[in-house]
Every structure is written in structure tokens, then in C-alpha cells.
Amino acid sequence: MEKKQYIVASEALRILIVHQGAIGDFILSLPAIGSFRYNFPGASIEIWGYPDILQLVEKRFYADTISSINRKEMAQCYNENALLDTKLVECFRQFGLIVIFGGEGQKTLLHNLKRIKMKEVHCINTFPQREEKAHIIDYQISQLSPLGFRVHDKVPTLFPNENDLKQATEFFTQRQLDNSSPMVAIHIGSGSRRKVWLPGFFAQLSEKLIEDYRAKIIVPIGPADEEIAHEYFNFVASDAIIPLVNLPINKLAAILQKCKLYIGNDSGITHLAAALGIPVVALFGPTDPHIWGPRGKGVSIVYKPSECSPCSREKMKRCVNQMCMEEISVEEVYSRVKCVIHDP
């Protein structure tokens, strides 16, 4: 498939991108997704996936429209022998190019699209094979070469809109927060407990920031963070710590963008913060930051590999000691943090 096929008709081209990843996975795919906008600037781009995540990009450079993948008729597409919904088939045929992000789990969808004679279908494997050491972003972009693409940016970038920024301003006004003290966001959770720095360490770090800089600490808490948040708040209690519980992703993004600094584990929210362009201190242990690390101008990664890290997903699940995370000291993280806070 060659890009030159579309140059003349790019104004009329409709592109469908299917991405069913979580927040971090989706953000790591933004450079590859953005390449379609750069290379087909006049095309209409629609992304199917999870709307609570996709709202980050709707009408913000990457996507003209978004749609939920969780529809009854879509379930048939993941059954190799199913009779596909007629209206869904008609919908697919309105697109001149379909791009599917994923791996083995997308093979049946790919098969069914070819079965209904969709010719221009491109599949991008989201994650590299275990023996490869390429960063996720580089690995995905490398698969665009058959399209003849020029890659403009290898750093994910998000664009909060005017309504998002208004909500963030209202948040700070309601809580009487101003620029007299640095605003620091600390996300204590992650998709896996094995990737989490000790809650007591996060508490010590928070206390240092409050004592030394009169910092205000913003703590995003999602449904998967409740247990670790409970442990964190058992260690620390202060009016300067503001929990943000289950905020819509766009509002959270706009609030984070107004912060002086973000500190967090290997998590989707850490990738979110980095894509907003704010300084980020990211803590890595069992996962390899050379493959999974957030990218951005102000990203600093704290990583102390142990004898057994980085490790495989299977080995990480069986881990009982978290040595790689426990060996990251509060003092080491604090030294990185101070460099950012003192930076004008």
C-alpha cells in the first residue's frame, strides 16, 4: 500500500483507526496516529476505541470524530465465522483506509475486514516481541514505512481545549489555589502493584515538599488506585494534599498541565502528564524505561535495575519482594524534584 494512491484525493479520504488500548498504551501510539494527520492533512479521521480515553483527542488534531468499540455488532467481528451486521459492513466500506492497532487479538478483525473485500487495511502491532529492545513509539512508527510516511514527531503531545482549561481554572479558583506555592501532582498508583513505589516513600516525599516549599500536592485517584491511596493517606494527612477522585480524563489533563511538576510510577497517568509537556519524574522498576518510558522534553526517569529487573510480565506477577522499587530512595527522588522546582 503506497501513500501516493491517496495524495490527489486526500480531501475526500476517510480513515478509520481502531485502538483498544488503555490510557498509557493509547498515548504511546499518538506519534503513529498523528502521522496519519500529517501525511493526509485533508482526510477525515475517525477513531474507534474507549470514549473515556478517546475524548483526549476528539477534535484535537488526531481525530475528527470518535466512537465506542463496545457495540453489539462489533462483537461479531471477533468471531471468524460470524455473519457480519449489514450496516456495519456498509460503515466499514465508507473508509478508504482502515488502520488497526493491536496484536494477536486483532487477527480475526483483520480477517473479517479482508473477507468483506476491504482492500486498504493496515495493522500496526502495538508491542514489540520480547527479544526486541526498541521503544514502543519507535517500534510502532517503524511499521509505517510501507505507507511511505514521513514521521514528524516521536513525542506524544496532547492539546487540552478551551473548555478543559476553563474547568481547570474553576477547580483552582474554588480551592483558592494560586501561584504562591508550587503545585505538584503525585500519582501513587499504576496498572500493577508491582510497579508501585512504596506508599510510605510517597508520603515522605509529600511531607518534604510541603515543609520545604509549601507545595500543594494534587493526588489523582482512579478506581484501580483506591487500595494504594488508602495506604498513602494512612501515612500522611495535610490540608495541602488534595485528592482528585475519578475525574474525567480531560479535566484531569487540564489540571495536570497547570502543575509545576508531576511525580509518578510507570502508569498511564504518567504518560498523560508527559504528553501535556509538564516536567515529569517517573519511577521505574520491573519494566524497562528504554522500552516503556514516557517521552517529553522535561521527563526525568529514576531507574535502579536490580539483578532481576527489568523482568517479563509473567515474572513480575510472581514477584514477592519489589526490590527494584524499594531500592529507589526518597532522597534520590527528592534530588530530582528539587532541580525542577528551582528551575525558573
Image: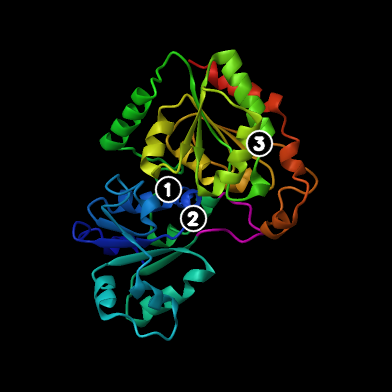
Label 3's element?
helix
Q: Quadrant of residue 299?
A: top right
Dot 1 surroundings within 10 Å: few (below 14), some, or many (20 or more)?
A: many
Label 2's element?
helix
Q: In the image, which residues are magenta?
A: 126-135
Q: Position of residue 178 (x, y in %)?
A: 40, 18
In the image, 16: left or right of 312?
Answer: left
Q: Nearer the viewer, mark 1 or mark 3?
A: 3
Q: Quadrant of residue 235?
A: top right
Write the residue at 70% across / 56% down: 317
Name the residue carrying label 1: 31
Task: State the separation of the CA atoms marked 2 and 1.
Answer: 9 Å
Q: Which amino acid type is marked by label 3?
A: Pro
Vertical position of residue 184 compared to residue 51: above or below: above
Dot 3 surroundings within 10 Å: few (below 14), some, or many (20 or more)?
A: many
Q: Which amino acid type is marked by label 2?
A: Gln
Mark number displayed over residue 222: none
Q: Position of residue 157 (x, y in %)?
A: 40, 40
Q: Mark 1 or mark 3: which comes first in sequence? A: 1
Task: State the separation of the CA atoms marked 1 and 3.
Answer: 33 Å
Q: Position of residue 211 (x, y in %)?
A: 60, 15
Q: Nearer the viewer, residue 96 or 162?
A: 162
Label 1's element?
helix
Q: Are marks 2 and 1 in contact (CB under 8 Å)?
A: yes
Q: Mark 3 or mark 2: which comes first in sequence? A: 2
Q: Are marks 3 and 2 in contact (CB under 8 Å)?
A: no
Q: Position of residue 309 (x, y in %)?
A: 74, 47
Magenta region, mostly helix, strand or loop? loop
Mark number displayed over residue 199: 3
